[in-house]
Amino acid sequence: MRTQISFAAAAAAVLATASASASTSVTYPYADDALLHVGEKNGGLAYVTEGVEDADEPAPVVVYLHGLNDCGSVHFWYGLFNTDLRPLADEIVAGGKVRPFVLAAPSQTYDAGSMSTMWGKFDLDTFLDATEDALPDGVSIDRDAVIVVGHSGAGCNLKGGLLGTLSPFVATRPAGIVAADTCFDANIGTALGGVPAGTPVYAFYQPFTWNRDFELFRASFRQELDRVPGRVGKIVVEDKNGNDPHNAILERALRESLPALIPIDQPDPYE
């Protein structure tokens, strides 16, 4: 199992597009003592996409939680092995269907090689506070437009990470949850299906490199969604086995979910 989801070495070909502009990226401390190895610092990274600073309103935030980090890299998925989510964020915004947003990510390097220990000490509220404090002057966060994305091992800990953001003790209610090829089993299905009414949840799954009993997930997910009126969920199953599908599905998840979760405001033709 671990070799199937320990994806660092395989990530070289995914999202290897043009490098992002450093002028719109900021790094900052976030729970460094708890989440990073001794001597490492500034585990938080936020990328302000084009248009945020000109919008004159609080910006949506896409919080990205990476999966297992066997290589122990700070700012995983921000340049390691030629993978970088920032050009993808730019491309999505440039498509004209998504509000300019802040892409923000904490880092975990300490105890980051096990699904059971991933993101157990992550707190969405304090992370958003730290992110907002680090953003350029004039940029603020729309706490009603916080999307949480968890890839691989980030969605495996029932008490932390992606699933931890659904806790009733978290003040910030996510406006959307995106689970990208994570631990899809019956327990995860029940947890993800238990989203607050009005918080859509997307589950993206690929069957090619990580064998899971997805039908058990599907059944428990649907059962829990149907139990409470107003709960909304969508399942997307990848049917094409391309290069490194475990990582490639993350790109698909962002491209397909964000236009629905943080759509650009359409002007009223009668105004």
Image (tube, grey):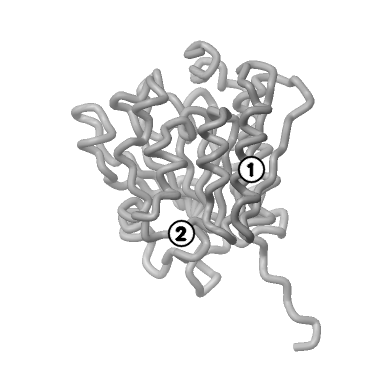
The C terminus is located in which quarter? bottom right
Q: Which amino acid, by three-letter code, is at mark 2?
A: Arg
Q: Residue at x 68, y 27 (%)?
A: 215
Question: Would you say 127 lies left or right of 41 here?
Answer: right
In the picture as drawn, the residue positioned furthest to the bottom comes out as 271
> Who comes first in sequence, dot 2 or dot 1?
2
Q: Relative to residue 210, is residue 87 depicted above or below?
A: below
Q: How many marks overall?
A: 2
Query: Which residue is identified by label 1?
Result: 223
Closer to the camera, 107 or 240? 240
Closer to the camera, 27 or 247? 247
Q: Distance between the residues labelled 2 and 1?
A: 22 Å
Secondary structure beneath label 1: helix
Q: Residue at x 65, y 48 (%)?
A: 233
In x, y percent, where is residue 235? 69, 40
Question: Which disc, if any, is residue 15?
Answer: none
Question: Which disc, if any, is residue 173?
Answer: 2
Q: Residue at x 61, y 34 (%)?
A: 250
In x, y percent, where is residue 9? 51, 15
Q: Which amino acid, by three-letter code, is at mark 1?
A: Gln
Secondary structure beneath label 2: loop
Q: Residue at x 66, y 61 (%)?
A: 263
